[in-house]
Image (tube, rainbow, N blue to C red):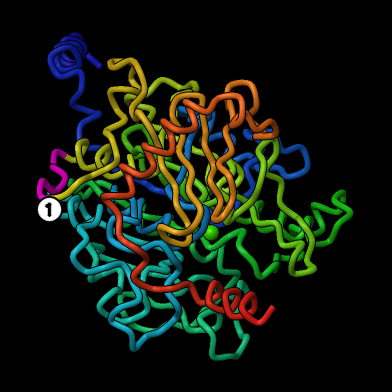
Amino acid sequence: MNRLGILLSLVLTTAFPALSADRPNMLLIVADDLGYHDLGFQGARDIPTPSLDRLAASGIRCTHGYVSHSFCSPTRAGLLTGRYQHRFGHENNPAWLPESTHDGLPLDQVTLPELLKKAGYRTGAVGKWHLGAHPQFHPMKRGFDEYFGALGGGHEYFPGKKGSSEYTIPLNRNGVDEPQTGYLTGQFGDEAAAFVKRHAGRGTPWMLYLAFNAPHTPLQAPERWLQKLAHIPDINRRTYAAMVCAMDEAVGHVLDQLQATSQRDNTIVLFVSDNGGPNLSFRGIGNFTDNSPLRGAKGDLYEGGMRVPFLVSWPARLKPGTYEQPVIALDFLPTLVSLAGGSPPQDRVIDGVDLMPFLTGEKQGAPHERLFWRTQGPQGNHAVRQGQWKLVRKAGSAPELYDLASDVGESSDLASEQPARVQELQAAIAEWEKGTIPPIFQSPRTNKKAVKQKKN
Ligand code: CA
């Protein structure tokens, strides 16, 4: 570079320091049923996850990061709307009912991709959808320009299995059925990497929602990963670990493609699991996930249900480190919409908070005064977190109170020692609940359980 060139670049970088960081691309990666402890950067010793570890090292690890539900579909409904899904009745998993215009993310809800599209972004989704089977709920009817994936709540990982459940339906590309050609997690990674490459250098920023169904059951993994994990004696744990490794490899392909197309610095990458690892002992499969040091598992309102690995990486703007105030995936919508220069809808409550000023250190304090969870409707299970305090109230049981600062494993119930705090948190739940409605559809499995319980 000659002297003029150096001078010019100095002037440009001084005069427009934020220019290169304006309007970032956005990659939102969601894992499915991943155990809290089951990634290298979360402490796993038996599952190598170099790509996700690299992502973690490049950004901010939110150590008190939550999702808004302890199972699949409601978390996604919250994440894509920025609102507690209880506000619009999306508290259960929709059944796979392609003829039902009712079981799915209600059409009056405004989604993150819709808002980004309005702001000029190109939007894509790859992977598991699980927000309704009827064509009116298809991702491309909900704000995505492009889609490739499995529309149900889960899918077979290897091609060729015949059947009539959502796990064996053909994959879907832009509304058209397409046969599966390979191991599903790898295929999703390849599709996401292709999206990243296809949209590089076009002058239009993009957002990609990459929702793996891994490592959700069925436990099916490529042989080469199983061989590499021969040190894990339990076959279920080994298979699950191999599924996590395959996902890590797929994430690696996407990150490599970002790098190769010079987009990594100005792409904000977010990573969460949609809920905690399941404990399937009740099905006789055993417990192959590890949520330690947290208590509980998928479906619970203890921390193991909805406190998840939570990353925000944006090399151009965010210094790597940790962030320790409670945050929730509901925050993605206001954060990303604000970065896009758009604005969230003004005619409804948005529960998420723009995290950027908190992550840059510009704003101190906690983004949320309280966080709430509820499963099984108003008569069901509730939880609230306020600062270090967590109240869990299971249906028909006395409330439990935990001090997460000294007892992250929720082992010591302090409710009887602190009745005033219990009362305060119960009142907070009652107040929050006024803004919610009962579930508008039922989970298929919950129905079965309810029937079974009735018979007993
Ligand atoms: Ca899940």
| 54 w.r.t. 283: above or below | above
Name the kind of residue labelled 1 in the image.
Lys
The magenta region covers 341-347
What residue appears at the point 35 percent right and 58 percent down from the top-left corner?
77
In the image, residue 341 above or below residue 131: above
- Residue 12: x and y in percent read 15, 17
The residue under the point 72% across, 62% down is 280
Camera-nearest residue between 88 and 271: 88
Taking depth in this image into account, of 15 and 241 the one nearest to the observer is: 241
Residue 255's place in the image compared with 370, above or below, is below
In terms of image quadrants, where is residue 218?
A: bottom right
List x then y, in percent, for residue 340: 19, 40
Within-10-Å neighbours for mark 1: few <14, some 14–19, many 20+: some
User: Residue at image x 44%, y 73%?
Assistant: 442
Residue 207 appears in the figure: yes
The quadrant where residue 155 appears: bottom right
- In the rendered image, which quarter is residue 134 located in? bottom left
Q: Is residue 348 left or right of residue 427?
A: left
Residue 112 locus on image (x, y percent): 25, 52
Residue 346 within the magenta-colored segment of the rendering: yes
Q: Secondary structure at mark 1?
A: helix
